Image (tube, rainbow, N blue to C red):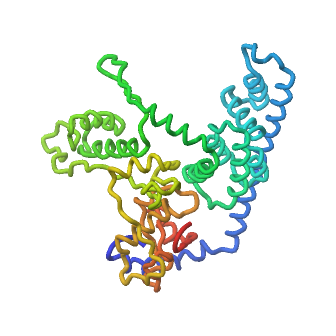
Amino acid sequence: MFETPSAARFDDWAAQARAQLEALTGTPESPEWTGRICAAARLANQAVAAQLVAIGELFAYRYSRCAQAQEWVVDAVDAVAAEVAAALRISQPRARGRVEDARALRERLPKVGQVFALGDIDVEAFRTIVSRTDLIQDPDILAVVDGRIAANVTRWPSMTRGRLAAKVDAIVARVDIDAVRRRKEMRSDREVWIGGDIDGIAQIQGTLLSPDAHALDARLTALAGTVCRHDPRTTTQRRADALGALAAGADRLGCRCRRADCAAGARQPASPGTIHVIAEQGAVDGTGTAPASELDADGLIDPELLIELAQTAKLVPLLHPGDAPPEPGYVPSAALAAFVRARDLTCRWPGCDHPAMRCDLDHTVPFADGGKTHAANLKCYCRTHHLVKTFWAGPTNSYPTAR
């Protein structure tokens, strides 16, 4: 339930509300409806995969009959995309994207393609897997990665693009040794470029370490929120102006409402952003090779970068509750809350990627009904799904140590 002292009393009222809605949410027809929804989704996945298989066969046929294609102005991909675009009455760019998906299914990830053809994953999941394996050049390594992903993807819980990307990245990191070299090259090439001044407006581009970029993003948002509600600028404009304030060392953005009663001065200054990274102790010490995870971010942090970050970061050990008894109060201790958030990473509702640091900690069995304040009975829910679970008796799941 919600992390407020009065939330236990709220449970009683919530139980009454659930009882009133029981007739609606517990009807015998509900499983039939959801079953039909899932069956339709599976058929849709199979249909999309079948289309890509056909496009892949068309491409293979056309390509086999253009031995001198490298000398042509229009390559086989564009030629086949033109055929697909005409047949499906879609644009050339969309058709080219489908040809590229079809080639990935046929040429790079055939085993994942088989899982897709069965309807067990959708096209967005397939494209995420393709994008996260796109840099692998060695065919033997790619075959191993393809097989491992295909063997595991249906066992992973429902997940968003970010969580799926992290799972795939972990497999690639264990198999593709050359990925270490590519990571070092990408880090060594990072830069910030400022220029293109036109009529008092300049452009800024750059590549940063992911934690630094996310910290900058959070800082700009915080600075943009220090003005009063009458400021005439949009949020995106204030974020752009916040970069100048940040360069000047300011902890707030000047308000432009020009009102005598402007309330911006009473607002708290923007505080530095906090980026949460979860890693094994061995990886922090340099004795392990497991990658780390950054909360509220896609992908993983490799061990080399983790060691560099750990030199200046505040390190806080996460204590596993183990067989510790339940805590006596409703609100979990800071240590227990930190463990649950680090365990869950995001909202536990299937398919939701709302960061755990901005989620409520929910008692699966309500505290008022005897539910314990223990890791096994606590999970992260975003506010929306917390309300759905509370008032509409949604699905629940809690595990003492992991997903």
Q: Is residue 253 left or right of residue 95?
A: left
The answer to which image quadrant residue 195 occupies is top left
Position of residue 29 relative to residue 118, above or below, is: below
Residue at x 17% of width, y 36% of height: 258
Q: Position of residue 302 (x, y in %)?
A: 50, 48
Q: Position of residue 222 (x, y in %)?
A: 30, 46
For the C terminus, which image quadrant?
bottom right
Q: How many marks?
A: 0
Q: Position of residue 376 (x, y in %)?
A: 50, 76
Q: Is residue 171 left or right of residue 105?
A: left
> Furthest residue to the front?
287
Res. 144 in view: yes
For the N terminus, which image quadrant?
bottom left
Res. 41 in view: no
Residue at x 80% of width, y 40% of height: 53
Q: In front: 265, or 19?
A: 265
Residue at x 21% of width, y 52% of height: 268
Residue at x 41% of width, y 37% of height: 208
Q: In front: 160, or 29?
A: 160
> Furthest residue to the bottom?
370
Q: In front: 323, or 380?
A: 323
The answer to which image quadrant residue 131 occupies is top right
Q: Position of residue 110 (x, y in %)?
A: 77, 44
Q: Is residue 67 left or right of residue 73?
A: right
